[in-house]
Amino acid sequence: MHTKEEVYNIDIKVGEKGNNIFITPVAGRVIGLLIYHNKGDEFVANAGLKADDGTYISKMQHIRNYRSRESCYFTGCKPVDFQTQGKTYTLEITTEEPVANKDFKGQLILIYEDTRFNNCGNE
């Protein structure tokens, strides 16, 4: 399977309640987002992806909505549909409580159009 994706590291330091991560993806059509992180299911955070003009590509919502849904590659991601056009985007992450014990670490994964064929067979 040919995949085209980009991975961006994200973090929130201990004692903080959020962070904005600025990304400039390569040109292409993004059709899915995933976020993986080092905190458990009890960790309450919201994330959203905003374009450079301030409009949301994906509105602020519980971070678990960006996780893999235990299904095929494309159908398991948060569906979106936008052309990156060399613009800068902001991933906003906020938490209800300050991060405790160890920094929040994770990755935002952008999935591009050429992975949409969604073949779940064993290849």
Image (cartoon, grey):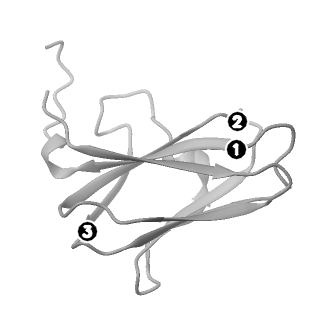
Secondary structure beneath label 1: strand
Secondary structure beneath label 3: loop
Q: Amino acid at mark 3?
A: Thr
Q: Position of residue 40 (x, y in %)?
A: 71, 32
Q: Which residue is mark 3?
A: 84
Whether residues under marks 2 and 1 lie with C-beta atoms below 8 angstroms apart, the answer is yes
Q: Position of residue 60 (x, y in %)?
A: 58, 66
Tag of residue 39: 2
Q: Nearer the viewer, mark 2 or mark 1?
A: 1
Q: Which residue is mark 1?
A: 104
Residue at 38% from the left image edge and 43% from the top image edge: 77
* Marked residue nearer the N-terminal end (3 or 1): 3
Q: Amino acid at mark 1?
A: Phe
Q: Amino acid at mark 2?
A: Lys
Side of 66 where 86 appears, left or right: left
* Residue 69 in which image quadrant: top left
Crowd around label 3: few <14 · some 14–19 · many ≥20 (10 Å): some
Tag of residue 10: none
Residue at 81% from the left image edge and 58% from the top image edge: 16
Q: Is residue 57 above or below residue 1?
A: below
Q: Identify which residue, 68 or 84, lies in the foreground.
A: 84
Q: Could you tell me if residue 58 is visible in this image? A: no
Q: Position of residue 84 (x, y in %)?
A: 25, 68
* Marked residue nearer the N-terminal end (2 or 3): 2
